[in-house]
Image: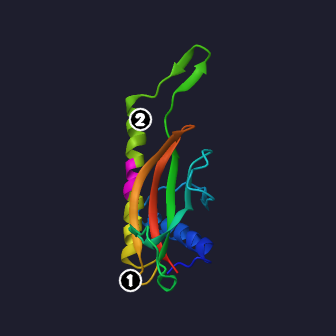
Amino acid sequence: MASLAGLPQTAAKLLADFIAQLEQLDVEIPERRYVASTPIPVWDGEQLTVSLSGMSQGQPGAGFGGTFHPSALNQFAQFAVQIVRKVSVLQADGPFRSTIPTGDEINADGLVTMGDAAALWTAAARLHFTYAEGMPGTGFEVGPLQTVGPEGGLAGVRLLLSLTVD
């Protein structure tokens, strides 16, 4: 089970576990892989990141807005796992000329993004089924997953994972 004091170690373990799972799935992983300070990508190149997205009281998948008795505090941390890749964009070839990406280029980018989405989801499910991030009975919610970007010729997918924190 993740601990409040061990959030940095949990993020680092998630990153290592996702790298291992994505390699098993034969996904080409960007060379830049790191624990990020926020779930908003640094739009400066391809990357695989893990960051803290937030914390709340309750159980993963069942946040609770009421008041817990201090001896029964339940809480969870939500982490964002992201893959960001280069995508085709409008190219300014000069002051009066631009090149628009072809449909085939845009299609190829879309297929890669969807493949990354499927791979992140599969990797998370494998980690959940093998209790890689906790013991049986530990809260672990996979999702939601959404696309991010495009920004500066980059786009990607972000998967949110919620883990019980003691």
Residue 159: x %, y % from top left: 44, 58
Question: Which residue is situated farthest in the top direction here?
Answer: 96
Which disc is residue 137 wearing? 1
- Measured in 3D between alpha carbons, the distance from the residue under mark 2 to the one under mark 1, in whole angstroms, is 43 Å
Q: Residue 33, how many percent across, how many down?
A: 59, 59
The quadrant in which residue 59 appears is bottom left
Q: Looking at this view, name the residue that lies furthest to the bottom.
A: 71
Which one is in front, 35 or 47? 35
Q: Which range of residues does the magenta coloring cover?
A: 114-118
Residue sitting at 49 percent across and 80 percent down? 73
Question: What residue sits right under mark 2 in the picture?
Answer: 106
Q: Amino acid at mark 2?
A: Ile
Circles 2 and 1, Cβ within 8 Å, touching? The answer is: no
| Other residues around mark 2 within 10 Å, as few (<14) / some (14–19) / many (≥20) | some
Q: Residue 66: where, in percent of width, then height?
A: 43, 70
For mark 2, give the secondary structure. Answer: helix
